[in-house]
Image: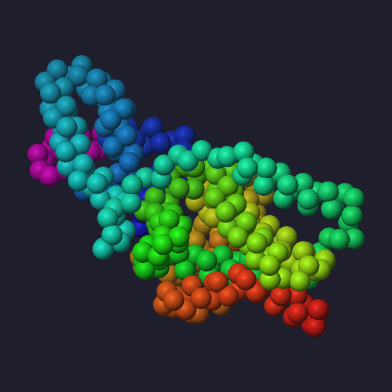
Amino acid sequence: MVLFASQDASKEGPKQDIWGSGARLFFLIGKLASSESIVEPCLLDYEMLQGQVHSGGATGAGAISSEGTQDTRAGEVLQEAQLELAPEKAERGKVLPNYEAFPPPPKVPTTWWQLLHHLLFFGLGIGTLLFQPSWLPDWKLTLVMYLYSDFMSALLHRTFDHEECLKVPALDFVAYGFQMHHAWPMESTKGVGLYRLFCDTVRIQWILLVCFAVISSHTLLAAQILYLKLLFGAYGSAVGHFYAHFPENQRPFLVRTLQGLHLLLPPKHHAVHHRAPYNENLTSVSGLTDFIVNPLLKDCPFIPTLLTLLGLSMFDIRLIEGLYSRFM
Ligand SMILES: [Zn+2]
Ligand SMILES: [Zn+2]
């Protein structure tokens, strides 16, 4: 439910101040009239109220101060609100019963080598388009890889969403990022920006490049499969997930259209994933393969999921190349 609270607040966008003031007034009037426990914090977006108390709250109290005696009472109410909301803030990141609350995602700077990676990747694609168009993949392979990448995004997601993965060395920090997202959905997507999400995929792209260099055949078809796998699986997945958490009134027209057509992950579809136990609608590209993925992965234990992910990550290019050559 964290997703809905955060999304609702963000959707308000420019109206937030008006809503914030209204909510605060409603809150204060209710408190002053009844002198009973405060309005349930869950009725108001926690962060919005907390933000008003910390920053706008001073302005609100100042406005009321002209009312004389209400000034002290309003100040008390705001202080009480802070005290009563403080324990809830400490629990905000708590999504796993047996794991401590996740703190908000830190601002991690991007690096020059991540930028270089993106430039080389898209430079290669644009260069091929301009100077060697015969090397471009055909529409059938593009469609297959678009759907396959959606499926792989779910397999990756399911693997790292398993609580056991938080204890596996070398995988634990990736699992942490995935599961922290359940606690801080907006903060870890819109809050960090799309470019940061692109950069987060660079490490796994390099692992896939090494797998390709060592295991796959080095044909044009294999290179096309690899390129489309990274394009849709890494960048497409980041774009799909980013805009699934983006406020509706700030999404570009093209994004809204693609989401409406289910060609890019629709927010309502992804919202299903953000309900405990976070094991449905795991895809990040389009959501088109969830009807296959949900029954397969929903209750799949950690070890089989991890082994399938490792196996496919290493051998999928060979597999797809063989199937594609034979049937298409
Ligand atoms: Zn998840
Ligand atoms: Zn999400």
Q: Which quadrant is the N terminus positioned in? A: bottom left
Q: Determine whether, in the image, residue 299 is placed left or right of residue 286.
A: left
Identified at 65% across, 74% down, the residue is 315
Q: Give the camera-side residue of 243 and 150.
A: 150
Figure label count: 0
25 sits left or right of 34 in the view: right
Prevalent SS, magenta region: helix
- Residue 289 appears in the figure: no
Residue 272: image quadrant is bottom left
Furthest residue toward bottom? 326
> Is 32 located above or below residue 230 in the figure?
above
Q: Is residue 200 visible?
A: yes
The magenta region covers: 25-38
Q: Where's residue 300, x and y in %?
A: 44, 78
Residue 77 in the image, given as x and y percentages of width and height: 16, 33
Look at the image and tell me in which quarter the C terminus lies: bottom right
In the picture, residue 148 is in which quadrant? bottom right
Residue 217 in picture, x, y percent from top left: 76, 71
Q: Nearer the viewer, residue 273 or 234?
A: 234
**In the orientation shown, which residue stands out farthest toward the left?**
35
Vertical order, 277 against 245 (above or below): below
* Residue 239 sits above or below residue 305 on the image: above
**Can residue 23 be found in the magenta stretch?**
no
